[in-house]
Image (cartoon, rainbow, N blue to C red):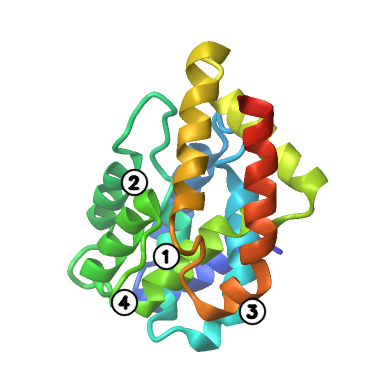
Amino acid sequence: MNLKEIYSELLSKIGFSANEIQQKWKDLEKAYSGKSRHYHNLNHLKEMIESFEIYRDKLENPNEILFSIFYHDFVYSASKKDNELKSAEYALTILTENIDLNKQLVFDAICATQQHQQNVIEDINWLIDFDLKILAKDWEDYKIYFEQIRKEYRIYPDFLYKPGRAKALKHFLENEFIFQTEEFRSLYEEKARINIEKEISFLI
């Protein structure tokens, strides 16, 4: 998968010039390639876009959701709690009036990746599920994922990180469903819960 090609094609389609696309890609690549980005990086975007490509036909607004994938973790700091809001605000700053995209949907979609709760807009539920699909990976891949998350939070000692991570994971288990679409529930719900429970056992 060539992320730059997918990105360039999308931005061209919605009204950006070639020069603008080149610069915005550089900015995006730089943001997602930061040294502290062990999980929330370009590879995470690739995995989300793989899901997006499979389910594109289910989406009413595929351009908005694809754009939201690219920008949903643009701003990311493990010590901050407003990354999604800041990412959404940044995404809107580059969507000038002449760009053919539903800006409110983009803003709401990116913000929704913070809480991962059921949304009245089905496109946003798909985005949330693309973001959380990692939770249902085979155990060895899931283990790599949570080790990468730990590295992103390395500024916190274990006595702070472990209970915080366990609390966040238990929140997923307390919800009636982890995934928001019927398709993802039937395919991935059970496996995600098993992985989360297993990770929690390492934390307590």
Q: Which mark is residue 84?
A: 2
Q: Identity of the amino acid at label 2?
A: Glu
Callouts 1 and 3 close, C-beta under 8 Å: no
Q: Quadrant of the N terminus?
A: bottom right
Residue beneath label 1, please? 67
Q: Quadrant of residue 67?
A: bottom left
Q: Secondary structure at mark 3?
A: helix
Write down the quadrant of residue 145 in the picture. top right
Q: Give x and y (percent) for residue 136.
A: 67, 57
From this viewpoint, is residue 14 visible?
A: yes
Q: Nearer the viewer, mark 4 or mark 1?
A: 4
Q: CA distance from mark 4 to mark 3?
A: 19 Å
Q: Of the residues under marks 2 and 1, which one precedes in the sequence?
A: 1
| Amino acid type indicated by mark 4 | Ile
Question: Which of the numbered marks, if any, corresponds to residue 54?
Answer: 3
Q: Nearer the viewer, mark 2 or mark 1?
A: 2
Mark nearest the camera among 2 and 4 is: 4
Secondary element type, mark 4? loop
Image quarter (top left, top right, bottom left or bottom right) of the C terminus: top right
Q: CA distance from mark 4 to mark 1?
A: 16 Å
